[in-house]
Amino acid sequence: MPPASAPEKTKLVVEVRVTFVGLIQRLVGRREEAVVLPQEATLGGLLRELAARYGQELEERLLENGELAAHVTILINGRNALTQGGLTAKLSDGSQSRVEIVLLGPPLMGG
């Protein structure tokens, strides 16, 4: 008989509904995305996950010197992420969260 294993810890998660608005919507090619993250996830963790899905250009558009770029507005549950701690802002106070990412400029350039 195999040894009894310790009970597995239940990992709490949050479903984050991400809405892409403006130029960022064109960059990722969709308006909305559902992302499941650990409940303690931060905005920085969400942006890393989105960059893994959509490529490095997304991260380059959203960040400058490791901080949110001045031309980006991100709302977490309707409130500006900058007033909630920027990249360290927690995404969840429950089981669901809404994040809206608005890229106002600079314009996307093709090449």
Image (cartoon, helix red, strand yellow):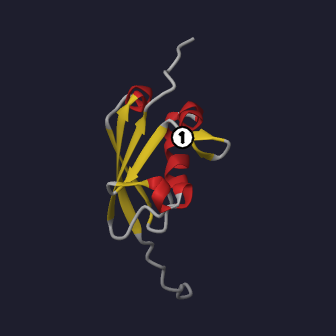
41, above or below 47, in the image: below
Residue 89: image x %, image y %? 50, 61
- Classify residue 73 as left or right of residue 109: left
Instruction: State the quadrant of the C terminus.
Output: top right
- Classify residue 6 as left or right of residue 64: left
Residue at image point 52% right, 88% down: 4
Residue 79, by quadrant, is bottom left
Residue furthest to the top in view is 111
Residue at image point 49% right, 54% down: 82
Q: Nearer the viewer, residue 49 or 98?
A: 98
Amino acid type assigned to the residue bearing label 1 in the image = Ala
Residue 69: image x %, image y %? 56, 40
The 10 Å Cα crowd at callout 1, few under 14, some 14 to 19, many 20 or more, is: some
87, above or below 90, in the image: above
Residue 103: image x %, image y %? 44, 34
Residue at image point 40% right, 42% down: 101
Residue 67: image x %, image y %? 61, 47
> How many numbered discs sit on the rendered protein?
1
Q: Nearer the viewer, residue 20 or 79?
A: 79
Q: Quickly name the residue at label 1.
A: 51
Residue at image point 41% right, 27% down: 23
103, above or below 43, in the image: above
- Label 1 sits on a secondary structure element that is helix
